[in-house]
Image: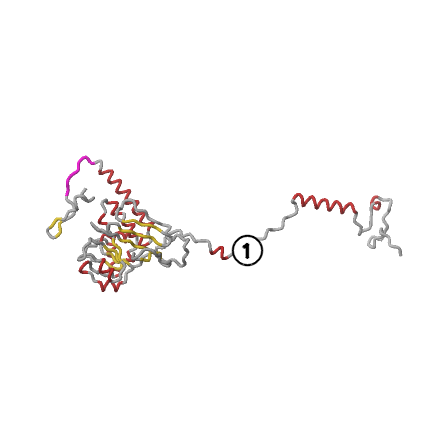
Amino acid sequence: MRYDSTYSPTLKHRADPQSPAGAGTKPAGHIWPGRIALFLLLTLLLVACGAVPNQPTPTPPIDPDAQAAQPVELLANLNRSCATEYSPDIDYFPEKVSVQYADGWTIEYFNNYKVITVLTPWRGAEETFQYVLVQCGTPAPSGYGDAPMIEVPVNSMISMSTTYLPHFEALEVLDRLTGVDNADFIYSPAVLDALATANVPTVGSGPDLDLERVLDIEPNVVMTFAIGSPDTDTHPQLTAAGVPVVINADYMETSPLGRAEWVKFTAALFNRERSAENLFERVAEEYNDLAALADTAEQRPTVFTEAPFQGIWYLPGGESYAAT
């Protein structure tokens, strides 16, 4: 049987070579050379025009070591916990204080520690005191000689003066007050309630210091004052016994705002710098408003300040801010 390219096993008829439909009919498997050329031309044009979809760019693999090398940025000081890991590139104290009015102390910040220097611990002092406050969970620095290394935030502090207690209340750290020198002169209801609730003991001061009780408390630090007298100062006994001590010399300031600014000194021990800055900003604003109002007074009467004690009326020094 002769193969006829016009034979269709389905339709079973011949295409009429004279009809329009049959005139151009070619074998089913035949491809015109012109069509091949046209297809190649279109393909080249599409590639040239960028119409052929690009292959997706593979995502480079993530390097875990590179990720780990990126330092973490803290948004706030750690005032209730220690650092869980240490990196020398992390600033562990993003919240800082600056000293504007006080003359008796300075503070300098480093990534994981801060250095406080008490410049005038008492009248006529020829020495200064330096304290290195190290973020707990990080290594202590070197190069500071015999300066005490105190881990912060402090969790247990003994206060040797009632003048420091308002700091505990304002900074909301009364729960860390673990001892006082004498409770007889405390009048703040919040402080008295905290002492009663936690059964906070008294430890005395000076020659009446109960050193054994202090050692039983095991405070992180004792905050005290000094006047340069070996017979009455408390810090020599505590230092000799290995108890960390910081000297607060707020009473040496020559201006009300200078003394009030020592709240920042206390705050640095608890990593509560932001609270202290906000508090002092309000105090300074109120004080300056009242001082401006007082300047408008036409009459300035002479008055006694302080109060009598055991038959003697004690007055502030004539050159102190309380007298002027």
Query: Seen from this angle, which residue lies furthest left?
Result: 311
Residue 29 lies left or right of residue 97; in this view the side is right
As helix, strand or loop, the secondary structure at mark 1 comes to loop
Give the quarter of the figure containing the C terminus. top left
Identify which residue is drawn at 89% across, 55% down: 2
Q: Quadrant of residue 214?
A: bottom left
Circle 1 Cα neighbour tier, 10 Å, few/some/many (<14 / 14–19 / ≥20)? few
Between 238 and 25, the residue placed more toward the observer is: 238
Q: Amino acid at mark 1?
A: Pro
In the displayed structure, 206 sits above or below 42; it is below
Query: Seen from this angle, which residue lies furthest right?
Result: 1
Identify which residue is drawn at 35% across, 57% down: 142
Q: Does residue 107 appear anywhere in the picture?
A: yes
Measuring from the top left, give residue 77's x and y in whole percent.
36, 53
Query: Seen from this angle, which residue lies furthest top?
Result: 298
Magenta span includes 301: yes
**Magenta span:** 297-303
Q: Does residue 194 appear anywhere in the picture?
A: no
The total of numbered circles placed on residues is 1
Q: Which residue is mark 1?
A: 61
Identify which residue is drawn at 17% across, 60% down: 207
Q: Quadrant of residue 300?
A: top left
Measuring from the top left, give residue 271's x and y in whole percent.
33, 53
